[in-house]
Image (cartoon, rainbow, N blue to C red):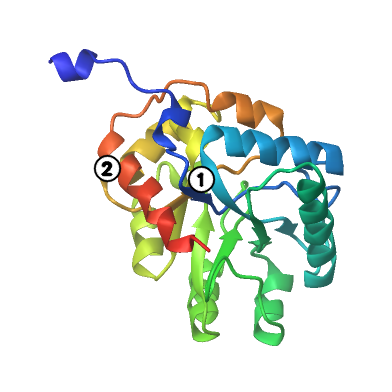
Amino acid sequence: MLSFLQSKPVLKELLDGTFTDIHSHILPGIDDGAQNITKSIKLVSSLENLGISQIITTPHINHYVWNNSPEIIAAKLQETQNALEENKIKTPVRSAAEYFIDSWFENHFKEEKLLTLKDNYVLVEISYLNAPLNIYKTIFEIQVAGYIPVLAHPERYTFYHNRFSEYEKLKNAGCMFQLNLLSTVDYYGSKITKIADELLEKGLYTFCGSDVHHKKHIAAFDSKIKIKNLAPLKEVIGNNAFFKF
């Protein structure tokens, strides 16, 4: 009873200075994240202050909205790294991408090499409106192409909330799950926090990320955790050590 009444920690207290973030949007002017290099610098500095020691940033690649390419991302990464060095910010930053699964992507990964988090781990997302009709076929084909799909923020796909078994089906199909840390503090709403808690309880998450786009996301790390399942959350945070570089 006493443990139930005990106050939950603030989210940033779970980051001990060794955390490798695998999901953020900090490159300047490339998607809906940092809009210029000044904001990029502020975001990296803020992430460092939260206890994040390394960043693998993941700009959107959505052919019909943010038509980024490896060349564009590499140039923006270099610009950011140069600016961080000039401002004496030592947090190392690398880049991958967050790929939107659609008809373009289904052909793209068969023809060109994907930008991965590490080795063959690739971050993917789906529409917030509804799941692709052929999602399981695509997951299978991603694996046939030699990649391991890591699904970004599954708790935010509300069409699965009343079909929870689909989460288990996706996991069994070979898709790893990445928790958005801000989903644990009601940032996206209490319903999403509830689903994140259930996914944690069932051990369905493997990794996590900040998904930081702007300063409001940074500020939310000062919020108290709202989920019940702290032990699996700490384990998932610890799993990100796999991506240390």
Name the residue: 53% across, 67% down.
Answer: 135
Amino acid residing under circle 1: Phe
Q: In which quarter of the image is residue 78?
A: bottom right
Which of the image's four quarters has the N terminus?
top left
Q: In this view, does 52 lie to the left or right of 37?
A: left
Amino acid residing under circle 2: Glu
Q: In this view, does 31 lie to the left or right of 151?
A: right
Depth check, front residue: 133 or 25: 25
Q: Position of residue 50 (x, y in %)?
A: 54, 33
Depth check, front residue: 173 or 30: 30
How crowded pointer 2 is (Cα within 10 Å; few <14, some 14-19, many 20+) is rated as some
The residue to which callout 2 is attached is 201
Picture layout, residue 150 above or below residue 111: above
Res 68 visible: no
Name the residue: 55% across, 70% down.
Answer: 134
Q: Position of residue 105 (x, y in %)?
A: 69, 71
Q: In which quarter of the image is residue 111?
A: bottom right
Picture layout, residue 200 above or below residue 174: above
The residue to which callout 1 is attached is 159
Name the residue: 51% across, 37% down.
Answer: 51
Identify the secondary structure beneath mark 2. Answer: helix
Name the residue: 49% across, 21% down.
Answer: 223
